[in-house]
């Protein structure tokens, strides 16, 4: 029958095109996450590296190296309420904030990308809610570092995260070793001003992906029984630990399903976190909240 072959081929082509179109209209599976954006932060916080909070209602934030020795007070929506210049301080590489139950804030000037710093410092800031702000300096070295810098395969002396617990400060390293295996080291120093040697008291292997397993921030809840460690796309929740052995209890790994340069974390309440991310080439700095439950 004349034209039959042509009609059959045309019909087959039509069916193929219809299938392709239908497939392209199907939505991609929705990624489920408990991370929710609160706001885009001011450009003054493009390099936000640490946050903390006394009450969960207001936040304090800092920028890292190359920025002024200023701490920002923010409301719960991330709006800047006040810029506070911290006396007798210098921002070599501020990386994290912590607080105690005496209304002191600790500023960790211990960023050490090249693993060669010998001037590691933590500033204890008192009177932040008054006109009488004072600064005490805690200088320290790391017990196990002997070379500055060490060999590339042993570059695990950068620090970007710490907490205050029971009168001591606990520091977590950001592993920059060339043969990355995910180990973060835990150090302990007292809050007493002066010179100290940070004691190495433990290690924990996060994961083996160097783009997603750097510890960039830490926080502890007000009860002192739950610690959160932050990476670019994960949280590690530590609980049921005993004394100094913070890795001795339960460790829950939570994937955020959202990759960005996250470097600041603190508790809003027992079940909610604030998380910040720095500006990158294609993304502005952000403030998020994350529901642990």
Image: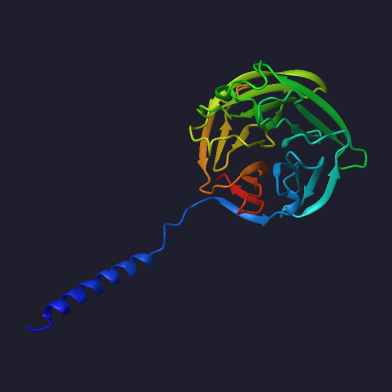
Residue 145 occupies quadrant? top right
Report whether 42 appears left or right of 215.
right
Q: How many numbered marks appear?
A: 0
Q: Is residue 258 visible?
A: yes
Task: Specify the quadrant that holds the C terminus.
Answer: top right
**Horizontal and vertical percent for residue 165?**
70, 28
Report whether 211 appears left or right of 16.
right
Of all residues shown, which one is farthest toward the bottom?
Answer: 2
Is residue 34 placed above or below 101 in the rendered structure? below
**Horizontal and vertical percent for residue 198?**
70, 20
Residue 240 occupies quadrant? top right
At 38% from the left and 67% from the top, the residue drawn is 25
**Horizontal and vertical percent for residue 193?**
83, 23
Task: Specify the quadrant that holds the N terminus.
Answer: bottom left
**Horizontal and vertical percent for residue 226?**
62, 34
Residue 105 occupies quadrant? top right
Color style of the picture? rainbow
At 83% from the left and 27% from the top, the residue drawn is 137
Name the foreground residue: 68 vs 193.
68
Is residue 243 placed above or below 253 in the rendered structure? above
Is residue 81 placed above or below 209 in the rendered structure? below
Of all residues shown, which one is farthest toward the left?
Answer: 1
Q: Is residue 248 visible?
A: no
């Amino acid at each position: 029958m004349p034209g039959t072959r042509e009609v059959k081929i045309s019909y087959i082509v039509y069916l193929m095109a219809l299938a392709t179109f239908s497939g392209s209209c199907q939505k991609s599976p929705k990624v489920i996450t408990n991370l929710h954006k609160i706001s885009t932060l001011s450009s003054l916080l493009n390099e936000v590296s640490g946050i903390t909070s006394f009450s969960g209602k207001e936040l304090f934030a800092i920028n890292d190296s190359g920025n002024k020795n200023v701490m920002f007070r923010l409301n719960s929506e991330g709006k800047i309420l006040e810029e506070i210049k911290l006396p007798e301080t210098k921002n070599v590489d501020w990386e994290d904030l912590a607080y105690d139950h005496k209304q002191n804030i600790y500023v960790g000037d211990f960023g050490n990308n090249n693993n060669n710093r010998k001037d590691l410092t933590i500033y204890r800031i008192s009177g932040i809610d008054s006109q009488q702000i004072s600064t005490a300096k805690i200088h320290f070295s790391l017990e196990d570092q002997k070379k500055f810098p060490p060999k590339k395969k042993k570059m695990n002396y950068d620090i970007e995260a710490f907490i205050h617990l029971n009168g001591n400060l606990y520091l977590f390293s950001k592993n920059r070793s060339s043969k990355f295996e995910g180990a973060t080291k835990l150090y302990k120093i007292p809050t007493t001003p002066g010179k100290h040697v940070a004691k190495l008291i433990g290690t924990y292997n996060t994961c083996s992906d160097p783009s997603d397993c750097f510890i960039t921030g830490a926080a502890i809840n007000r009860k002192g029984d739950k610690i959160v460690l932050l990476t670019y796309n994960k949280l590690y929740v530590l609980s049921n630990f005993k004394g100094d052995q913070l890795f001795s209890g339960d460790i829950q790994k939570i994937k955020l399903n959202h990759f960005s340069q996250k470097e600041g974390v603190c508790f809003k309440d027992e079940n909610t976190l604030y998380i910040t991310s720095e500006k990158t080439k294609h993304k502005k700095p952000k403030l998020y909240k994350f529901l642990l439950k």
